[in-house]
Amino acid sequence: MSLFGDGHDAAVRKSFTRPAPKSAPAQMRYLVRQLKGTKAVAQMLRISQRTVERYVKNQIKKPRPDLAARLEREVNKRWQPQIRARARRKAATTDGIVIDTRARLGYTAPIGSTDEDRLRHLAVALPPQYAARLFEAQQAGAGDQQLQQIAAEGLREVYFQDGGHRAGSLEEVRFTDIEHLEFDL
């Protein structure tokens, strides 16, 4: 996954009403219920069907680190889909999304202005249309570069241009060297 994609998912997970299963056997039972069988879970996790059955029966409790990571990722992907959809819909229509980042930001502007990249720490509330664009692009399988471009456009409009009140001739914002990136709904 990507830095931006993981950030969106983390923001959506904050809206969950119940915690996802923590133990490997509980996670495995959840996936078996979701995928309606041990064979599908085994194929998805790239392990044997017998291993899945042993987790379900609590015969195995501690997976290898790589399997534990895959198991947690798959459970989190499927956990509370209706609440996940509601949080995304609310961010995309009314609330917007908050981006908290420490990154090198620069911009393209007419000659005579200072457009040097510099490290900035910003916490900016982007309007709902940018949240919608970010979620749509993520679901369409967009890469980090495309998501970064959408976020940069939002920062240009909200932070640099202050909704059209300043820096009207600003053409492009560059978003590079990301040290920290966090989203909140």
Image: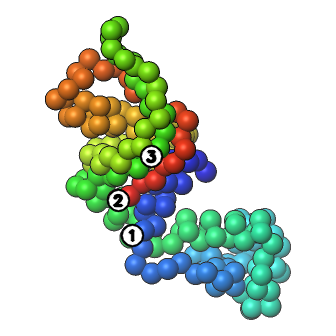
Q: Nearer the viewer, mark 2 or mark 3?
A: 3
Q: Earlier in the sequence, mark 3 or mark 1?
A: 1
Pointer 2: residues within 10 angstroms few (<14), some, or many (20+)?
many
Q: Residue at x 61, y 51 (%)?
A: 1
- Specify the label residue 185 is tagged with: 2
Q: Residue furthest left?
A: 165
Q: Earlier in the sequence, mark 2 or mark 3?
A: 3
Residue 7 horizontal/vertical position (percent)? 49, 54
Q: Dot 3 lies on which element?
A: strand
Residue 129 horizontal/vertical position (percent)? 28, 44
Camera-nearest residue between 96 and 112: 112
For residue 24, side relative to residue 172 (left or right): right
- Specify the label residue 101 is tagged with: 3
Pointer 3: residues within 10 angstroms few (<14), some, or many (20+)?
some
Q: Residue at x 34, y 52 (%)?
A: 98
| Residue on which the image places disc 1 | 15
Do the numbered discs 1 and 2 sit on residues whose CB atoms are within 8 Å?
yes
Q: Dot 1 lies on which element?
A: loop
